[in-house]
Image (cartoon, rainbow, N blue to C red):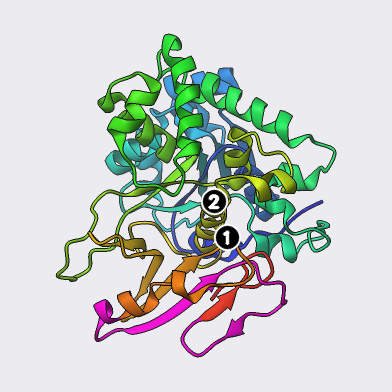
Amino acid sequence: MWIDRLMTPRIEQALASRPVVMLTGARQTGKSSLLRRLLPQAEYITLDRVSVAMEAEENPAHLFDRLGSQTILDEVQYAPSLFRELKILVDTDRNNYGRWVLTGSQRFVLMKHIRESLAGRISILHLETLSAKELRDSPAPFEKKPTTLLWKGGYPELWANPAIDPAMYFEDYIQTYLERDLNEIIKAANLRDFRRFITICATRVGQLLNYSDIAKDVAVSANTIKQWISILEASGIICILPPYYGNINKRLIKAPKLYFSDTGLLCNLLNINDYEGWYAHPQKGSLWENFVLNEYMKTTASVPGKNLFFYRDKNNVEIDFVIERGGSITLIEAKAAERIDERGLNFSKVRTVFEGKKVDCTVACRIQEHHFIQLKSYNLVNPLLHDLA
């Protein structure tokens, strides 16, 4: 079963305008499958195969000589030497758009080599796991029980093959991530600590990122935690949401917040294996908040630190998410309940801070209507059921 991806038009536009296109994203988000479906005539080379990766690393010119047409190079982080050779080829035929299509799941390896070799020659796109909208528009039996997405997450294989047990899938996923992606970065003696660190991060989701507190729980240094947080973020496992600054002359919280890029992996780390477990979990509010953030990132091209933030001042007045587009601001509160207590909303306290800008307010909650509801001062929307504006 194929599920169409919202990213497709952006990839097609990049292929028509840049000589090199790279699709990044965590493992198993569907990068290779999407590109091979879009480009069925392209040659496909995967550097997951050790022998191919060795050739690409030690003799990239010989590898490229064999490739006569549009080529997909999968998991290029395993052969960083090929970037220098690729730069030479691109510069000899700069207008051959879409000639080289790359994928990679380790941005901490990739970006250094891209900056050095392919700056100005490459379009970089990031693929997340499946969104609720993609599942609503797909042949998957999503509409019968959309709440499944809250704990199962959006990794495509889990939806394409319902026979897969999510708990076993995520255990294999984490083990593969540790053994293959991090083996050369995290010393083997630290892998157990790193596994505990990932689980502790899951318990801190939606909270201000405090390296020292996490370091105490893992029993490593704060500098080690900073390095490990960077690795998780670069691998697409977590996302770091910075606070909104703008030109606001107020004393604002400076620490960012920690979220996971997929709620399925997050729930698995918290031993949540069904909707009943999700609904009864003491972190339900934070889990819903994480899901809402994921949906805005996946469906509205909102990027943490670019146009997506949170707001919190020294008086603990907080708005979960702030999206800035041009001169307009969207304030979003994520509430896991179906009925909203307006006393828990801070729109009126924060709205005046953005004086001179157009401000819209939204509560992302679990209303059951299959359309968003427009009230006098804010809108109600359920990302499981509604398209997000």
Describe the element under mark 1 as helix, strand or loop.
loop
Residue 326, by quadrant, is: bottom left
Left or right, residue 267 beside residue 189? right
**Toward the viewer: 218 or 79?**
218
Location of mark 2 (residue): 127
Disc 2 to disc 1, C-alpha distance: 7 Å
Rendering quarter of residue 82: top left
Q: Is residue 113 left or right of residue 71?
A: left
From this view, report whether residue 263 is shown above or below residue 217: below
The magenta-colored residue range is 352-378
Using the image, determine if residue 206 lies above or below residue 250: above
Residue 199 colored magenta? no
> Horizontally, is 356 left or right of 230 in the view?
left
Please tell me which of labels 2 and 1 falls first in the chain: 1
What residue do we see at 78% from left, 34% from top?
165
Q: How many labels does the image show?
A: 2
Question: Residue at point 37% right, 82% down?
Answer: 359
Name the residue at 35% across, 61% down.
309
Residue linked to disc 1: 7
Give the farthest residue toward the bottom. Answer: 376
- Type of amino acid at the residue the image marks with label 2: Leu
**x and y, in percent, of residue 308 in the image:** 38, 63
Image coordinates of residue 181 in percent, x first then y, are 50, 25
